Amino acid sequence: MQGALAIQAIHSFGSPEQQARWLPGLVKGELVGCFALTEHGHGSDPGGMEARATRDGDYYILNGSKCWIGNASIADVKVVWAKDGDGRVGGFVVEKDAPGFRAQDIEGKFSLRMSRTSECWFEDCRIPAENRLPKASGLGAALSCLSYARTGIAWGVIGAAIDCYETALAYAKSREQFGRPIAGFQLVQQKLVWMAQEITKAQLLALRLTRLMEAGSARSAQISLAKRNNVWMALRCARKARDILGAAGITDRYSVIRHLMNLETVSTYEGTHDIHTLIVGRDITGIDAFAG
Ligand SMILES: Cc1cc2nc3c(=O)[nH]c(=O)nc-3n(C[C@H](O)[C@H](O)[C@H](O)COP(=O)(O)OP(=O)(O)OC[C@H]3O[C@@H](n4cnc5c(N)ncnc54)[C@H](O)[C@@H]3O)c2cc1C
Protein backbone atom coordinates (compact mmCIF):
# COMPACT_ATOMS: atom_id res chain seq x y z
CA MET A 1 0.00 0.00 0.00
CA GLN A 2 2.72 2.40 0.97
CA GLY A 3 5.08 1.68 -1.93
CA ALA A 4 3.26 0.30 -4.94
CA LEU A 5 0.07 2.27 -4.35
CA ALA A 6 0.35 5.56 -2.40
CA ILE A 7 3.95 6.37 -3.38
CA GLN A 8 3.51 5.07 -6.91
CA ALA A 9 0.41 7.22 -7.49
CA ILE A 10 2.15 10.42 -6.39
CA HIS A 11 5.36 9.46 -8.19
CA SER A 12 3.56 8.75 -11.48
CA PHE A 13 0.80 11.35 -11.43
CA GLY A 14 1.82 14.09 -9.00
CA SER A 15 3.30 17.49 -9.83
CA PRO A 16 6.94 18.18 -8.86
CA GLU A 17 5.62 20.23 -5.90
CA GLN A 18 3.40 17.38 -4.71
CA GLN A 19 6.25 14.91 -5.07
CA ALA A 20 8.63 17.14 -3.09
CA ARG A 21 6.01 17.63 -0.40
CA TRP A 22 4.91 14.05 0.26
CA LEU A 23 7.33 11.54 -1.24
CA PRO A 24 10.35 12.02 1.06
CA GLY A 25 8.26 11.40 4.19
CA LEU A 26 6.43 8.47 2.61
CA VAL A 27 9.63 6.87 1.35
CA LYS A 28 11.31 7.20 4.76
CA GLY A 29 8.26 5.80 6.50
CA GLU A 30 7.76 9.01 8.45
CA LEU A 31 4.40 9.49 6.75
CA VAL A 32 1.81 6.71 6.37
CA GLY A 33 0.03 6.54 3.03
CA CYS A 34 -3.07 4.81 1.81
CA PHE A 35 -4.83 4.20 -1.51
CA ALA A 36 -8.61 4.45 -1.47
CA LEU A 37 -10.27 2.98 -4.55
CA THR A 38 -12.71 0.32 -3.32
CA GLU A 39 -16.18 1.45 -2.18
CA HIS A 40 -18.92 -0.31 -0.23
CA GLY A 41 -20.86 -0.90 -3.44
CA HIS A 42 -17.97 -1.17 -5.91
CA GLY A 43 -15.11 -3.64 -5.41
CA SER A 44 -14.40 -5.58 -8.59
CA ASP A 45 -16.11 -2.82 -10.56
CA PRO A 46 -14.28 0.36 -9.50
CA GLY A 47 -15.45 2.18 -12.63
CA GLY A 48 -18.89 2.37 -11.00
CA MET A 49 -17.51 4.42 -8.10
CA GLU A 50 -19.88 6.93 -6.55
CA ALA A 51 -17.38 9.16 -4.72
CA ARG A 52 -17.51 12.69 -6.12
CA ALA A 53 -15.06 15.60 -6.07
CA THR A 54 -16.79 18.89 -6.90
CA ARG A 55 -14.73 21.99 -7.64
CA ASP A 56 -15.51 24.98 -5.41
CA GLY A 57 -13.11 27.84 -6.11
CA ASP A 58 -9.67 26.90 -4.79
CA TYR A 59 -11.02 23.70 -3.25
CA TYR A 60 -12.53 20.34 -4.11
CA ILE A 61 -15.42 19.08 -1.99
CA LEU A 62 -15.36 15.29 -1.62
CA ASN A 63 -18.47 13.25 -0.89
CA GLY A 64 -18.85 9.48 -0.75
CA SER A 65 -17.36 6.51 1.04
CA LYS A 66 -14.57 3.96 0.65
CA CYS A 67 -14.26 0.51 2.17
CA TRP A 68 -11.50 -2.03 2.89
CA ILE A 69 -8.80 0.64 2.79
CA GLY A 70 -5.49 -0.34 4.38
CA ASN A 71 -4.34 2.21 7.00
CA ALA A 72 -7.04 4.77 6.11
CA SER A 73 -7.73 5.60 9.75
CA ILE A 74 -4.11 6.52 10.49
CA ALA A 75 -2.80 7.64 7.11
CA ASP A 76 -1.17 11.06 6.78
CA VAL A 77 -1.48 11.01 2.99
CA LYS A 78 -4.61 9.40 1.51
CA VAL A 79 -4.73 8.99 -2.27
CA VAL A 80 -8.48 8.97 -2.89
CA TRP A 81 -10.07 8.19 -6.26
CA ALA A 82 -13.28 10.04 -7.10
CA LYS A 83 -15.17 11.34 -10.12
CA ASP A 84 -15.02 15.06 -10.84
CA GLY A 85 -17.82 17.29 -12.19
CA ASP A 86 -17.22 15.90 -15.69
CA GLY A 87 -17.54 12.32 -14.44
CA ARG A 88 -13.81 11.73 -14.96
CA VAL A 89 -11.95 9.70 -12.34
CA GLY A 90 -9.18 11.65 -10.65
CA GLY A 91 -6.76 11.15 -7.77
CA PHE A 92 -7.03 13.51 -4.78
CA VAL A 93 -4.69 13.68 -1.81
CA VAL A 94 -6.56 13.99 1.46
CA GLU A 95 -4.30 14.90 4.34
CA LYS A 96 -4.66 13.89 7.95
CA ASP A 97 -7.39 15.75 9.82
CA ALA A 98 -9.04 17.08 6.65
CA PRO A 99 -12.45 18.43 7.70
CA GLY A 100 -15.32 16.10 6.76
CA PHE A 101 -13.22 12.91 6.77
CA ARG A 102 -13.81 10.09 9.21
CA ALA A 103 -12.75 6.45 9.30
CA GLN A 104 -13.49 3.35 11.29
CA ASP A 105 -11.39 0.19 11.43
CA ILE A 106 -12.97 -3.08 10.34
CA GLU A 107 -13.01 -5.56 13.24
CA GLY A 108 -13.18 -9.34 13.19
CA LYS A 109 -10.77 -10.12 10.36
CA PHE A 110 -9.27 -13.62 10.40
CA SER A 111 -6.84 -12.67 7.64
CA LEU A 112 -4.06 -10.03 7.67
CA ARG A 113 -4.95 -9.45 11.30
CA MET A 114 -1.93 -7.27 12.02
CA SER A 115 -2.86 -4.91 9.19
CA ARG A 116 -5.31 -2.11 9.87
CA THR A 117 -8.15 -2.01 7.35
CA SER A 118 -10.76 0.73 7.45
CA GLU A 119 -13.94 2.03 5.95
CA CYS A 120 -14.13 5.75 5.58
CA TRP A 121 -16.51 8.54 4.72
CA PHE A 122 -16.14 11.93 3.06
CA GLU A 123 -18.87 14.37 4.02
CA ASP A 124 -18.31 17.72 2.32
CA CYS A 125 -14.63 17.03 2.86
CA ARG A 126 -12.79 20.15 1.71
CA ILE A 127 -9.30 19.79 0.24
CA PRO A 128 -7.17 22.37 -1.59
CA ALA A 129 -7.54 22.17 -5.39
CA GLU A 130 -3.75 21.84 -5.61
CA ASN A 131 -4.10 18.40 -3.96
CA ARG A 132 -5.50 16.91 -7.17
CA LEU A 133 -2.90 14.74 -8.94
CA PRO A 134 -2.60 16.61 -12.25
CA LYS A 135 -1.48 13.68 -14.40
CA ALA A 136 -4.07 11.17 -13.12
CA SER A 137 -6.72 11.33 -15.79
CA GLY A 138 -9.30 8.56 -15.77
CA LEU A 139 -9.61 5.18 -14.10
CA GLY A 140 -6.57 3.92 -16.02
CA ALA A 141 -4.34 5.96 -13.71
CA ALA A 142 -5.59 4.10 -10.63
CA LEU A 143 -5.39 0.77 -12.43
CA SER A 144 -1.82 1.41 -13.53
CA CYS A 145 -0.81 1.65 -9.85
CA LEU A 146 -2.42 -1.74 -9.31
CA SER A 147 -0.13 -3.17 -12.00
CA TYR A 148 2.90 -2.45 -9.81
CA ALA A 149 1.18 -3.80 -6.72
CA ARG A 150 0.14 -6.99 -8.51
CA THR A 151 3.70 -7.57 -9.67
CA GLY A 152 4.84 -7.18 -6.06
CA ILE A 153 2.20 -9.66 -4.98
CA ALA A 154 3.39 -12.16 -7.61
CA TRP A 155 6.76 -12.12 -5.83
CA GLY A 156 5.57 -11.78 -2.25
CA VAL A 157 3.40 -14.87 -2.24
CA ILE A 158 6.37 -16.95 -3.38
CA GLY A 159 7.99 -16.13 -0.04
CA ALA A 160 4.93 -17.41 1.80
CA ALA A 161 4.91 -20.56 -0.34
CA ILE A 162 8.62 -21.24 0.29
CA ASP A 163 8.12 -20.88 4.03
CA CYS A 164 5.23 -23.35 3.88
CA TYR A 165 7.33 -25.76 1.81
CA GLU A 166 10.36 -25.56 4.11
CA THR A 167 8.23 -25.92 7.22
CA ALA A 168 6.42 -28.95 5.79
CA LEU A 169 9.66 -30.57 4.60
CA ALA A 170 11.37 -30.19 7.98
CA TYR A 171 8.28 -31.47 9.78
CA ALA A 172 7.90 -34.43 7.43
CA LYS A 173 11.49 -35.49 8.01
CA SER A 174 11.19 -35.38 11.79
CA ARG A 175 7.65 -36.65 12.32
CA GLU A 176 7.44 -40.45 12.50
CA GLN A 177 4.34 -42.59 11.94
CA PHE A 178 4.18 -46.33 11.27
CA GLY A 179 7.81 -46.53 12.39
CA ARG A 180 9.29 -44.17 9.79
CA PRO A 181 9.43 -40.46 8.91
CA ILE A 182 6.29 -39.39 7.11
CA ALA A 183 8.61 -37.85 4.45
CA GLY A 184 9.18 -41.45 3.36
CA PHE A 185 5.57 -41.95 2.29
CA GLN A 186 4.84 -41.49 -1.40
CA LEU A 187 1.73 -39.38 -0.82
CA VAL A 188 3.67 -36.93 1.35
CA GLN A 189 6.51 -36.77 -1.20
CA GLN A 190 3.96 -36.06 -3.92
CA LYS A 191 2.80 -32.96 -2.03
CA LEU A 192 6.37 -31.77 -1.43
CA VAL A 193 7.30 -32.31 -5.08
CA TRP A 194 4.22 -30.38 -6.22
CA MET A 195 5.23 -27.46 -4.01
CA ALA A 196 8.84 -27.42 -5.25
CA GLN A 197 7.66 -27.65 -8.86
CA GLU A 198 5.02 -24.91 -8.61
CA ILE A 199 7.26 -22.57 -6.60
CA THR A 200 9.94 -22.90 -9.28
CA LYS A 201 7.46 -22.17 -12.07
CA ALA A 202 6.06 -19.19 -10.14
CA GLN A 203 9.57 -17.78 -9.68
CA LEU A 204 10.20 -17.99 -13.42
CA LEU A 205 6.85 -16.34 -14.15
CA ALA A 206 7.53 -13.48 -11.72
CA LEU A 207 11.04 -13.02 -13.07
CA ARG A 208 9.84 -12.87 -16.67
CA LEU A 209 7.07 -10.43 -15.74
CA THR A 210 9.56 -8.20 -13.93
CA ARG A 211 11.84 -8.17 -16.98
CA LEU A 212 8.84 -7.10 -19.09
CA MET A 213 7.92 -4.41 -16.52
CA GLU A 214 11.48 -3.11 -16.56
CA ALA A 215 11.35 -2.94 -20.36
CA GLY A 216 8.00 -1.14 -20.15
CA SER A 217 6.33 -3.77 -22.31
CA ALA A 218 4.26 -5.80 -19.80
CA ARG A 219 0.58 -6.01 -20.73
CA SER A 220 -2.18 -6.06 -18.12
CA ALA A 221 -3.19 -9.61 -19.05
CA GLN A 222 0.36 -10.80 -18.36
CA ILE A 223 0.27 -9.11 -14.95
CA SER A 224 -3.10 -10.73 -14.25
CA LEU A 225 -1.78 -14.15 -15.27
CA ALA A 226 1.14 -13.86 -12.84
CA LYS A 227 -0.94 -12.54 -9.93
CA ARG A 228 -3.61 -15.17 -10.48
CA ASN A 229 -1.23 -18.10 -10.85
CA ASN A 230 1.17 -17.22 -8.06
CA VAL A 231 -1.48 -16.50 -5.43
CA TRP A 232 -3.30 -19.71 -6.38
CA MET A 233 0.01 -21.60 -6.19
CA ALA A 234 0.83 -20.16 -2.75
CA LEU A 235 -2.63 -20.94 -1.40
CA ARG A 236 -2.34 -24.53 -2.62
CA CYS A 237 1.14 -24.82 -1.08
CA ALA A 238 -0.14 -23.52 2.25
CA ARG A 239 -3.06 -25.94 2.11
CA LYS A 240 -0.81 -28.92 1.35
CA ALA A 241 1.69 -27.90 4.04
CA ARG A 242 -1.07 -27.62 6.60
CA ASP A 243 -2.16 -31.10 5.62
CA ILE A 244 1.36 -32.54 6.09
CA LEU A 245 1.57 -30.98 9.57
CA GLY A 246 -1.56 -32.82 10.68
CA ALA A 247 -3.10 -31.41 13.87
CA ALA A 248 -0.01 -29.29 14.49
CA GLY A 249 -0.81 -27.46 11.27
CA ILE A 250 -3.78 -25.66 12.76
CA THR A 251 -1.75 -24.12 15.57
CA ASP A 252 0.29 -20.92 15.66
CA ARG A 253 3.38 -22.95 16.61
CA TYR A 254 3.94 -23.10 12.86
CA SER A 255 3.61 -20.29 10.32
CA VAL A 256 1.57 -22.31 7.84
CA ILE A 257 -1.95 -21.57 9.06
CA ARG A 258 -1.09 -17.85 9.25
CA HIS A 259 0.04 -17.90 5.63
CA LEU A 260 -3.07 -19.81 4.65
CA MET A 261 -5.35 -17.25 6.27
CA ASN A 262 -3.41 -14.25 4.94
CA LEU A 263 -3.31 -15.61 1.41
CA GLU A 264 -7.11 -15.65 1.42
CA THR A 265 -6.99 -11.85 1.42
CA VAL A 266 -4.31 -11.76 -1.26
CA SER A 267 -6.53 -13.92 -3.44
CA THR A 268 -9.25 -11.25 -3.15
CA TYR A 269 -7.47 -7.93 -3.17
CA GLU A 270 -5.78 -6.31 -6.14
CA GLY A 271 -8.41 -8.05 -8.25
CA THR A 272 -9.96 -11.35 -7.26
CA HIS A 273 -8.80 -14.65 -8.74
CA ASP A 274 -11.90 -14.77 -10.92
CA ILE A 275 -11.56 -11.17 -12.12
CA HIS A 276 -8.05 -11.98 -13.33
CA THR A 277 -9.49 -15.04 -15.07
CA LEU A 278 -11.82 -12.68 -16.96
CA ILE A 279 -8.96 -10.32 -17.85
CA VAL A 280 -6.88 -13.17 -19.27
CA GLY A 281 -9.94 -14.73 -20.91
CA ARG A 282 -10.74 -11.46 -22.66
CA ASP A 283 -7.15 -11.19 -23.85
CA ILE A 284 -7.19 -14.72 -25.28
CA THR A 285 -10.62 -14.64 -26.92
CA GLY A 286 -11.16 -10.96 -27.61
CA ILE A 287 -14.57 -11.31 -25.94
CA ASP A 288 -15.41 -9.41 -22.73
CA ALA A 289 -17.13 -11.70 -20.18
CA PHE A 290 -17.35 -9.12 -17.38
CA ALA A 291 -20.99 -8.21 -17.72
CA GLY A 292 -24.16 -9.36 -19.44
C1 LIG B 1 -7.61 -6.97 3.90
C2 LIG B 1 -8.00 -6.19 2.67
C3 LIG B 1 -7.29 -5.02 2.37
C4 LIG B 1 -7.69 -4.25 1.26
N1 LIG B 1 -7.02 -3.08 1.01
C5 LIG B 1 -7.49 -2.24 0.04
C6 LIG B 1 -6.89 -0.95 -0.13
O1 LIG B 1 -5.93 -0.57 0.55
N2 LIG B 1 -7.43 -0.11 -1.06
C7 LIG B 1 -8.50 -0.46 -1.84
O2 LIG B 1 -8.95 0.35 -2.67
N3 LIG B 1 -9.09 -1.70 -1.69
C8 LIG B 1 -8.60 -2.58 -0.77
N4 LIG B 1 -9.19 -3.83 -0.59
C9 LIG B 1 -10.40 -4.15 -1.37
C10 LIG B 1 -10.19 -5.20 -2.45
O3 LIG B 1 -9.46 -4.68 -3.53
C11 LIG B 1 -11.60 -5.70 -2.86
O4 LIG B 1 -12.08 -6.47 -1.78
C12 LIG B 1 -11.59 -6.51 -4.13
O5 LIG B 1 -11.39 -5.67 -5.27
C13 LIG B 1 -12.92 -7.27 -4.34
O6 LIG B 1 -14.02 -6.43 -4.14
P1 LIG B 1 -15.22 -6.92 -3.18
O7 LIG B 1 -14.65 -7.41 -1.91
O8 LIG B 1 -16.20 -5.80 -3.15
O9 LIG B 1 -15.85 -8.18 -3.91
P2 LIG B 1 -16.94 -8.16 -5.08
O10 LIG B 1 -16.48 -7.28 -6.18
O11 LIG B 1 -18.29 -7.93 -4.50
O12 LIG B 1 -16.84 -9.68 -5.58
C14 LIG B 1 -17.44 -10.76 -4.85
C15 LIG B 1 -17.29 -12.02 -5.69
O13 LIG B 1 -17.94 -11.84 -6.96
C16 LIG B 1 -17.02 -12.13 -8.01
N5 LIG B 1 -17.31 -11.28 -9.17
C17 LIG B 1 -17.45 -9.92 -9.21
N6 LIG B 1 -17.70 -9.51 -10.45
C18 LIG B 1 -17.70 -10.62 -11.24
C19 LIG B 1 -17.88 -10.88 -12.63
N7 LIG B 1 -18.07 -9.88 -13.51
N8 LIG B 1 -17.82 -12.16 -13.08
C20 LIG B 1 -17.57 -13.17 -12.21
N9 LIG B 1 -17.40 -13.02 -10.89
C21 LIG B 1 -17.46 -11.75 -10.41
C22 LIG B 1 -15.64 -11.84 -7.42
O14 LIG B 1 -14.61 -12.55 -8.14
C23 LIG B 1 -15.81 -12.34 -6.00
O15 LIG B 1 -15.63 -13.75 -5.97
C24 LIG B 1 -8.78 -4.66 0.46
C25 LIG B 1 -9.44 -5.86 0.76
C26 LIG B 1 -9.06 -6.61 1.84
C27 LIG B 1 -9.80 -7.90 2.14
Image (tube, rainbow, N blue to C red):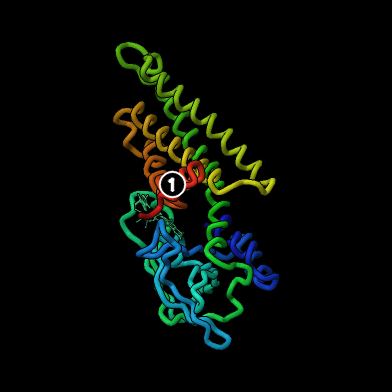
Q: Is residue 70 above or below residue 260?
A: below
**In x, y percent, where is residue 248?**
32, 31
Which element carries disc 1, helix, strand or loop?
helix
- Report the side of 98 relative to 42 (left or right): right
Say which residue appears at 36% left-offset and 12% top-offset.
180
User: In the rendered view, would you say 91 is above or below 263?
Assistant: below
Q: Residue at x 69, y 69 (%)?
A: 20
- In this view, the residue in front, 278 or 174, is 278
At horizontal 39% and vertical 71% (from top left) the residue drawn is: 65
Q: Is residue 165 visible?
A: yes
Q: Which residue is mark 1?
A: 278
Q: Give the position of the C terminus as an image quadrant.
A: bottom left
Q: Is residue 28 left or right of residue 241?
A: right
**Residue that protrudes farthest toward the bottom in the picture:** 57
Q: How many numbered marks have been drawn onto this rendered protein structure?
A: 1
The amino acid beneath tag 1 is Leu
How crowded pointer 1 is (Cα within 10 Å; few <14, some 14-19, many 20+) is rated as: some
User: Toward which corner of the image does residue 238 lie, by quadrant?
Assistant: top left
Look at the numbered disc 1 and say if its residue's Cβ is closer than 8 Å to ligand 1.
yes
Quadrant hosting residue 184: top left
Residue 240 placement (x, y as % from top left)? 37, 30
Q: Is residue 76 visible?
A: no
Q: Is residue 291 above or below residue 57?
A: above
The percent coordinates of residue 124 (x first, y second) are 43, 82
Which of the 4 quarters of the picture holds residue 2?
bottom right
Rendered-image quarter of ligand 1: bottom left
> Residue at 41% of width from left, 59% of height from top?
45
The location of residue 147, given as percent across then percent down, is 56, 52
Q: Residue furthest top?
A: 179
